[in-house]
Image: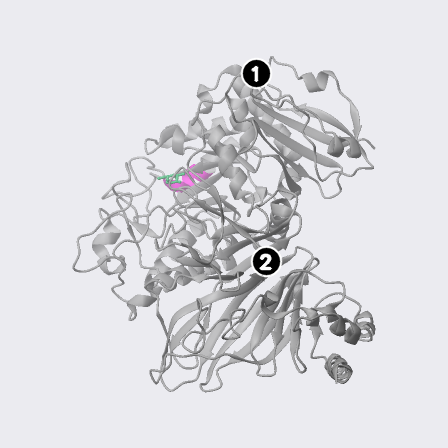
Amino acid sequence: MRRYTESFLYLLLLCESLCNNLISISFNSYSFMKLHYLFLPFMLALTQQTQAAPGDRHIIIETRQTALVIRVDTAQTPTIVHLGPKLRNAAEYALIPANGKRGEDYTGLYNSIYTPAGGRNLLEPAIQVTHADGNPSLDLKYVRHETQSMVGGAVQTNVYLKDPQYPFEVTLHYKAYPNEDVIEQWSTIRHTEKKSVFLHKYASANLYIPAEQYYLTHFHGDWANEMNPSEIPLTEGIKLLDTKLGTRADLFQPPSFLVAINQPAHEDRGEVIAGTLAWSGNYQLAFEVDPLHNLRLLAGINPFASAYTLAPGKAFMTPAFLFTYSTQGTGGASRSLHRWARKHRIPQGEGNRLTLLNNWEATYFDFNEEKLSALFKDGKKLGVDLFLLDDGWFGNKYPRNNDRAGLGDWQENIKKLPHGLGYLVKEAENAGIKFGIWLEPEMVSPKSELYEKHPDWVIKLPNRQEYYFRNQLVLDLSNPKVQDFVYGIVNDLLTKNPTLGYIKWDCNAVIYNAYSATNANQSHLYVDYVQGLYNVLERLRAKYPTLPMMLCSGGGGRVDYGALKYFTEYWPSDNTDGLERVFIQWNYSYFFPAIATCNHVTDWGKQSIKFRTDVAMMGKLGYDIVVSKLTEPELEFSQQALKTYERIKNVIWQGDQFRLASPYTSDIASTMYVSEGQDRAVWFSYLVKNRYKAGSAAPVKLKGLNPDKNYTIQELNVYPGTSSPINRNSMTYSGNYLMAIGVNPQVSARRESVVLEVTEVK
Ligand code: GLA
């Protein structure tokens, strides 16, 4: 009997393969896969677990190293049976037991690919709806799936699901980037019921990970205190990470996290999933350890105050959830995300960036044409590419001389800038640098002409007292007229000043008293706001595809891959204290590449200008200082640093990042960037403790080099009047030695930051 069953199973699977129902989106040899079926019955006989039943089908989504496997049973219920390492032989995915097979799943839905609420489900749903007839249940059955090769090498799988009782459909999209090991996932919801359907919850992704232990690293903070990590073991129940702030949504926590499997996150070893939601508004990330002790992960827009009324025939598309699975710890995960972001997401991710001098901390609101002209010359003298004029240049009836007025009135203040922006652009260009400008176009000051003219454009409750965040309110971007206004502001600026070289786009307030004067559906406001913002950015990018734009939100209040589709770079924090930045940048670097990370040398902190410059070089270098106040050696050092940066920036921007020593567990922080050809690397180390004798006591092992190559090590950014002990004893080492034994960068209280260039000897 058993033999008979095995042969039957074998036959079935073989038939399936022929009918192409078992689809591998991998780059495996198909014939090898077929050959393997010969052995499948024996393997099935060997195992006691319940694998695929006769008639089950598998949808396999693979990257170079990872596989996400969906099993569709004969009742057409789609479940996730695997998220982890890609198997060499795709046929063996059929052997994977459902649910990690730890016990009884009463519903057969614990590992649903998109858990519907209201039916037999007992756990956190991915989707919850009320149908047009008032029925609050949903069932989602597999209908079909398809795969397509996309531009840039991605492979997209669309899985179509439908409720058997209602004309209600969900399509799950999985876009696999094979070379970068990243999977992007989102869903499209549509129906043709007689009237609208209410979507109460509509997640982007619903994943399932069976393991023994789960360690979640999440990040939290506040203004000037972004990205503090906490690693916690997940236990049964739900841990929620979310925001309800609307705008500046990541002020307290970003939509990015790490889950380490079976052991706490390690930089080089072990399984880690790095995930992030590409959405600049309210999000919810749920980590539910289910009754079988498996991890259910649900990521999407926050259902809080956001029930969506979906009309028949219309489609609702959720934002994308992005994740990578690594068997090489957090280092492997972040290198994959960096590569993906540079290649597929961030505008000009593999292109150039401009160094700049910003005037915010140099002048705050207090400047005029004369002062600015002098700063242009200072920027040129320093050696940067661009001058960035920050807040305070606009508003006439209510001049922007402090943060209590003027937002929304985007006309040059005639007292400060009588000759207008065009004149400043030319003046900067005459001085030999480009000119860029700060905008906060989503916001309005209560004291502004815009507010007086269009009170109905402002998000506020009609019967409640206004409540301000940084003395300002948020414009209602769910209103198409407001979208046109915001687009018009930026477009006018760029039309009048075609050589304007840069925009810093700020967003300093959260949404209080959420209410739209024009939106027919108040519970659409949070979602429509973000979609409205993306509409504006989409239009701007279509017209100005190469304009460098910085994403800022009072620091890192909006750092996500939804917005970073439009911005070339982001501002991680207003906190530019060199020591603080070592930590802040360290944590952002788990998710975002150096080329997009704007680091400015400012007067914050007690560290030397060398320390602050060395830290700022681990990304996109800029300045926000009074150049004329620098001492002679400080200026000389900075000028030289900019020249060095020009030479090494591509290694930092495009190289693979390897974290060597963590500031959380060591006296030093140490990290390096290695070029793709493994012929160049830049290695940064900083003292982060101030106890007696704190420093790098032992050699630090390098990573990512070629063991068979030979390298020299040269210290960069040596401060004028000092000499480098490393350069004095210049040596050649094999990559093997550098990675097995290492070299001591000699960080100490006398050498608080050390930048080393590692170059292949050819
Ligand atoms: C925010 C930004 C700063 C600066 C000010 C200007 O706080 O993060 O960099 O632009 O606004 O008001």
Q: Position of residue 283 (x, y in %)?
A: 42, 58
Q: Is residue 422 magenta?
A: yes
Colour mode of the rendering: one colour
The quarter of the image holding the C terminus is top right
Badge 1 crowding class, 10 Å Cα cut-off, few under 14, some 14 to 19, many 20 or more, is few
Q: Position of residue 267 (x, y in %)?
A: 62, 42
- Residue 750: numbered disc: 1
Residue located 52% across and 15% down the image: 632
Foreground residue, 463 or 383?
463
Image position of 525 (left or right of 598): left
- In the displayed structure, 194 sits above or below 440; it is below
The boundaries of the magenta stretch are: 420-425
- Residue 211: numbered disc: 2
> SS of the residue at dot 2?
loop
The quarter of the image holding the N terminus is bottom right
Q: Position of residue 563 (x, y in %)?
A: 47, 54
Q: Amino acid at mark 1?
A: Arg
- Residue 177: numbered disc: none
Q: CA distance from mark 1 to mark 2?
A: 47 Å
Q: Amino acid at mark 2?
A: Ala
Is any atom of residue 344 visible in this view? no
